[in-house]
Image (cartoon, rainbow, N blue to C red):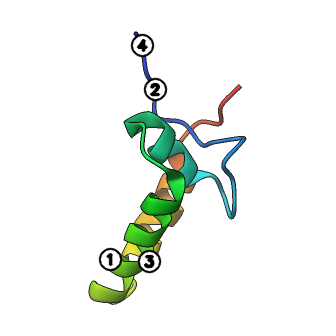
Amino acid sequence: MNKKLRLSANNKIIAGVCGGIGEYFSVDPTLVRIAVVLLGLVFNFSLVIIYIVCWAIMPTSE
């Protein structure tokens, strides 16, 4: 099985990054979104920059 990390077309709220990560790891994308928000609060929103970078470099799903 050849899994690739891609932006999600189905589980998309803002850009599809959390949906894509959730699909890649077979986890509910809502849990990934909650983890991103909580980690963003803990690390003074530096995770927002990482999210934007992932949005820019991750390819879209077909």
Q: Which residue is mark 3?
A: 37
| Dots 4, 2 in contact, CB < 8 A | yes
Say what secondary structure mark 2 lies in.
loop
Q: Is residue 47 left or right of residue 54?
A: left
Which comes before the other along the chain, label 3 or label 2?
2
| Dots 1, 4 in contact, CB < 8 A | no
Q: Which residue type carries mark 3? A: Val
| Dots 1, 3 in contact, CB < 8 A | yes
Q: Which residue is mark 1?
A: 39
Q: Quadrant of the C terminus?
A: top right
Question: CA gap, disc 1 to disc 3?
Answer: 6 Å
Q: Residues within 10 Å of mark 3 (few under 14, many from 20)?
A: some
Q: Is residue 20 left or right of residue 34?
A: right
Measured as percent of width and height from the top left, residue 59 is found at: 59, 36
Q: Which residue is mark 2?
A: 4
| Dots 3, 2 in contact, CB < 8 A | no
Question: CA gap, disc 3 to disc 4?
Answer: 29 Å
Q: Which residue is mark 4?
A: 2
